Image (cartoon, rainbow, N blue to C red):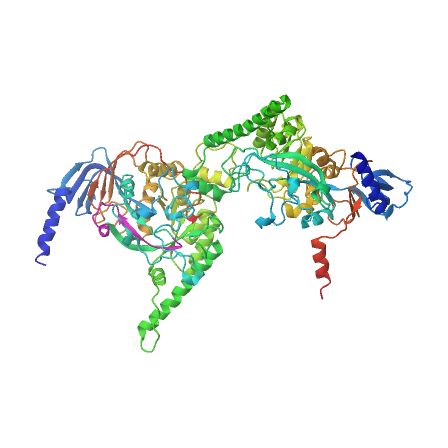
Amino acid sequence: MRKLVPALLLLCAWAIAENPRTLAIRNAKIVTVSGPVIDKGTVVVRNGLIEAVGENLAVPAGAWVIDGEGMTVYPGLIDSLSTVGIPSLAPPPAGRGGRGQTTTTPAPPPSPATAPATAAAPVTPAKGPEDRPATTSWILAANEIDPSDHRIESVRSAGFTTTVTFPARAIFGGQGSIIDLASAERAGEMVVVPAVGQYLAVSRGGGMFGGFGAGFPNALMGYIAYIRQIYLDAEHYKLLKEAYAHSPRGMERPPYDRALEGVLESKRILLPANRVVEMDRMLRFAAELQQPVILYGMREAYRPEAAPLLKKYGSPVLVSMHWSEAPRDPDPEAYRTMRSLENIDQGPAAPGLLQKAGVPFALYSDGLDQPRELQRAVKKAIDAGLARQDAIRALTLSPAEIYGVADRMGSIEAGKIANLVVTKGDLFDDHTQIEMIFVDGKQYKPAPEPPAGGGRGATEEPGVSQ
Amino acid sequence: MKLLGILIGCGLAAGAASNNSVLIRGADVYPVTSAPVKGVSILVLDGKIAEIGAKIVVPKGVRVVDGKGLRVYPGMIDSGTELGLSEIEMIRETVDTGELGEFMPQLRALAAVNPDSEHFAVVRIAGITSVMTFPAGTGGGEGGGGRGRPPQYISGQAALIHTFGRTWEDMAVSGSAAVQVRFPILGPPGGRGGPVPENIAGLAGETGAVTFTEMTRTYQQEVAKLADFFDEARRYQKAKAANLPGFVRDLKYEAMLPVLDGKLPVAIAAATPRSIHDAIQFAEKQNVKIVIMQPRELGSAAAELKAKNIPVILGRVLALPRGQDDPYDQAFTLPGEAYKAGIKFAFGTFDNQFVRNLPYQAATAVAFGLPQEEALKAITINPAQIWGAGDQLGSLEKDKSADLMVTTGDPLEIQTQVKHVFIRGQEIELSSKQTRLYDKYLNRQ
């Protein structure tokens, strides 16, 4: 203890030198999200937390004062489903992939929703469900975070201060963690909540491109049967464990099963759904499994049947911002299905419609990691009918609420984590400049824009590995 | 030589009491090229149709078949098969189609025809007496490359064959009825003209997507390559005509001569109006005859086909629409559309196992707008004419090959039974592997 105090003091001193522990942004427009917009106000940050926010605040002595004249302060953006922080799950760089790739990693870029079993996934061909194929439910994203992932800076430059990162690479991929995108020495410093829920994926269809590995399950019926069995097993496993804990004497010890442990520990599950029938199926499925669920993907949530259905179940949804896009320089006579044309045309209208219907939703990046791409993606939703303040909410307070962390992030309120974005101009406008980003009260400047181009088109089916 | 032929002919006639001569008496005769005549007889002598009439004196020794209540039609012709070259598609050893090489016009499908293929019996007892058999097969014929094979431009010579014979020489009607060309298709690599399924397009999509500019470049390169080969063949033709010293015969170019002379058509599979147009443009530029095969959509190409008098081989009618938003009857109505446009066409089944369904493919087209008699023509006289055998096959006319089917009714009706089949006047035993299996299990207790 005696040693600890000087050490702590030293640490503080170092921190102050690097980045002041107390700061105030003055005379700025403050979009609190949780309350009304403050046209000219002050935000005081101390020790990584928001100490106060308001119109006529006294700036504490010794604080580093930033003049926010002409600037707007927003809560840091939250990417509600991401793989940022796990470099092995980064999508391949543009210009590669597709046809030319080897057959071991077919598939589109492994955005969280489309991740095939690559590199790190310990997947061996399974003979049947008892082998627990493509299951790494025990993995915690928090344990896999690598602070050197270059996407951290790139995503942060777009205004994201927080991601909900999932080890998205199998049927039961593992549990996601909420991480703050700080440049930390140790990954542990970045973790806000280590376990927020289990990521599930399904792969559509068997044949050449389906499946996470060779063998079962390889078709939709297999996935459904497998997931169902896992939950039956987990239920049984839980009963055995409880019985054994109650009176171990004279009882055969139930074998430890990490896969079922991982499933039991997950407080919610994330299930993919893009088409309306998939939403319906997954909502019923989650109800049957008696698991709180978040649906992700939502490519066709713009269809009129979608919002009432989602509203009926009340489960929150995560909408992919990887909108379908018309291919560049396409064959003018190429056959485009009505469905794909509608997806391109109306996809970005989904958030606005969900908002109107009162469905709790958040937006997620789905593999987009360039600041320009991300801003453009949000802009598309705004242009398609989502009010700007609702877009901001869908990237701040809404995801915080969905994951049950609205008590510590998602808005500019006293006591919350000091994750802030400071802009010149309205966030998501074409010419808006992000001036600075604060993560845990530490200031970052956006990285210089990478050279133009390199954008990727939409994945065909977010949430469904091909 | 001629004398020898006559001698052999006499020998056969004398020895076997001419098993290729027959009189079918009192039947309704449907010649296809003229109006049906009821209650007449048809005389076949030495494999040829000798006479059709009410009162025919039966020559001595000629067998008489009672045709009362039956109908006589010319045998049907399927314009798109790989019969004789492929037995069981999934067993590589039984498949002789698809030789490798980019330019292989010298390959003759006929030389590889297996007369003992089980398919022939199944097909001929259905009344199909001749087929076109294609050297590259027909399933993958729509693409420049496709199916992961190295690209091929010219696959060889398609043969028009009878579906009965002891040897392939016996079966041949024409050993060279067309040269099969796989014309490059402007589209995504490996594409076969049809739409790429979306889940697969999605894979290629993103960064792997091929832009139209790239597609066009590849396409133009491929067309240029094909044109180069035609130019080489033309130089060869000149050199041969000039009989230049040091001239060496080359089978590849030799095989192209009938094409360049306009005697032999190139058969090109083209699914879309654009690829049809492209193929026609090429044939015009090269001044060669062309037959378009397996269109799935005619659209703007219909007028062009009509104006230039280009025959078309329609593929399967009993097929799914091309894309998920296309009308369900897209394939069913295509023949009617071709008819209305005035295009000359024939049917091909393009699937070895289901050649026997040829009349039902045509029948479906009838249900969707094609006049019945036109459907019948498209499986008899039209293919005979398109493949250069209009004087031998395809209708019941004097001196034509006696390829007949004797049925209980309209061959397009599924209830109709085929009672007799004659190929070159020789009656075919109406048994096949299918009937043998049928009998075997019918008698099982």
Q: Is residue B12 left or right of residue B131?
A: right
Q: Is residue A184 magenta?
A: yes
Q: Pick whichever, A170 or A345, lies toward us.
A: A170
Q: Position of residue A342 (x, y in %)?
A: 48, 39
Relative to A315, say whether B194 is above or below: above
Residue lying furthest top: B242
Q: Quadrant of the N terminus of chain A?
A: bottom left
Give the camera-side residue of A344 and B243.
B243
Q: Position of residue A139 (x, y in %)?
A: 32, 56
Q: Is residue A39 visible?
A: no
Q: Which residues are magenta?
A: A170-189
Residue A34 on image: x %, y %: 28, 45
- A186 vs A317, left or right, is left
- Find out whether residue A132 is within the magenta segment: no
Whether residue B3 is visible: yes
Location of residue B273 by image quarter: top right
Depth check, front residue: B233 or B413: B233
Image location of residue B266, percent across then percent down: 63, 32
Counting every numbered tag in the picture gives 0
